Image (cartoon, rainbow, N blue to C red):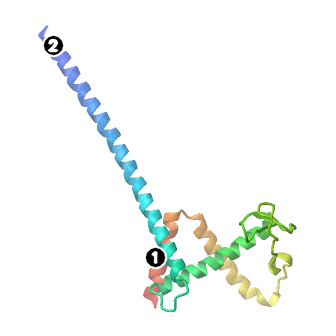
Amino acid sequence: MELFDKLGDTLVSVSKDATQKAKDISELARIRMEIHSKQDYINKLYQEIGRLYFEAHKDDEQQEFEDEITLLKDSQEVLEDLKRQKNQLKGTIKCDNCGQEMPSDADFCSKCGSKLEKTKKEEEVVIDPESEESAEDSTAQSESAEDSATQSDGEAVENSAVQTENEIQAK
């Protein structure tokens, strides 16, 4: 009888330990998920603060982050050019009022009704053989921007920070 009592006590003890370990693992997973969620939230807030700062100070004469703002403006121009190229290949144009993509032959936006403004690039594409050098520069910029676009947000931010740091050190 004593053997069965010891066996019963051992089983109860082991099951309590296993139950406690399962609770601990579950609690650890919940805490990790909450930490990750809060880190994402903080990163989004940092990003929003940076965007608001940029919007507020992009036209200031003396800028605290002049090099970074210049890089950001240049990147935005390249991105807009790439978007125009993409839309041209797709045969679409973007409504300036609401952002809806429309077929390039449309005169009005089907979402908001605004008249679609067609740029000269969208109306007629002429390749100048003398501008071959600038086309190569544009292709290099496009490839660089395309590489950045395919990276995850974290990698793009990290690479951008490293590139900015390298450019600042070079000056």
Residue 46's image quarter? bottom left
Task: Give the left or right position of residue 80, taking residue 121 as reference.
Answer: left
Marks 2/1: CA–CA distance: 66 Å
The reply to whether residue 168 is visible in this rendering is: yes
Q: How many marks?
A: 2
Q: Quadrant of residue 85?
A: bottom right
Of the pair 91 and 141, the residue shown nearer to us:
91
The outermost residue toward the left is: 2
**Does the rendering let one see residue 160?**
no
Residue 91 pos. (x, y %): 82, 66
The numbered disc on residue 5 is: 2
Q: Residue at x 82, y 81 (%)?
A: 120
What residue is drawn where x is 49% and y is 78%? 163
2 or 1: tag closer to the N-terminus: 2
Q: Residues within 10 Å of mark 2 (few under 14, many from 20)?
A: few
Q: Secondary structure at mark 1?
A: helix
What amino acid type should be assigned to the residue bearing mark 1?
Val
Instruction: Name the amino acid, label 2.
Output: Asp
In the picture, measured across the screen, residue 136 lies left or right of residue 171, that is right
Dot 2: element: helix
